[in-house]
Amino acid sequence: MKIFESLFSRRKFLNSLFGGGLLALFATVLTPVIRFCFPGVIGPEPDEVLLTPEEVPQLEPNQGAIFRYGNRPGLIFRTPSGELRAFSATCTHFECTVQYNGKDKNIYCACHKGYFDLDGNVIAGPPPRPLPRYVLEQQEDGGLLVMKPEWAKKKKEEQAEG
């Protein structure tokens, strides 16, 4: 074996480096595309979520915030009159996250310019259905119980029976 002989030539080394870079580029580009086309299983939406006093956003009238409703985003906002409301923050069009727009007093989906009123009804854009609304129940410790309407109704019936 010669002293200057190597297992890899300079050309092989540079080709390997270039090939590895291309492979990394394709992986970087294709991973989000694959995750978009084949989303993982999120699981069922919970019937209720208890927000601790620390998790409850302190909102002034005409302000909104996003919170976690299980594995999904929820939208909570205080109307200009001071009423606290909560909805699913997942747009009914293509599941983008919606935001509360205090300036225009509506709920806005930036993906395809969908607009909802403060009751969650569609007022403009492509969303086919209104946003699902949640029922809010203030807790004694300052927390907030966020529930699906059918779950709140069932809970109220059980309390009336027992």
Image (tube, helix red, strand yellow):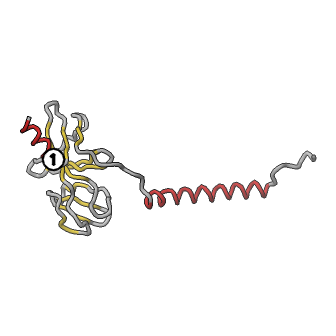
**Quick one: label 1, few (<14), some, or many (20+) residues within 10 Å?**
some
Residue at disc 1, secondary structure: strand
The residue tagged 1 is 135
- Name the residue: 18% across, 57% down: 103
Residue 28 in percent (x, y) is at: 54, 56
Does any portion of residue 147 appear in the rendered image? yes
Camera-side residue: 43 or 32? 43
Question: What residue is shown at x 17% (from left), y 58% (from top)?
Answer: 120
Q: Position of residue 68 (x, y in %)?
A: 29, 45
* Residue 151: x %, y % from top left: 17, 46
Name which quarter of the figure residue 13 lies in. bottom right
Residue farthest to the right? 1
Closest to the observer: 60 or 69? 69
Above or below 126: residue 32:
above
Q: Is residue 63 visible?
A: no
Position in image of residue 126 (x %, y %) = 26, 69
Q: Extreme top residue here?
A: 141
Q: Residue at x 14, y 38 (%)?
A: 138
Q: Residue furthest front?
A: 161
Q: Is residue 34 left or right of residue 83?
A: right
Classify the position of the C terminus by image quarter: top left
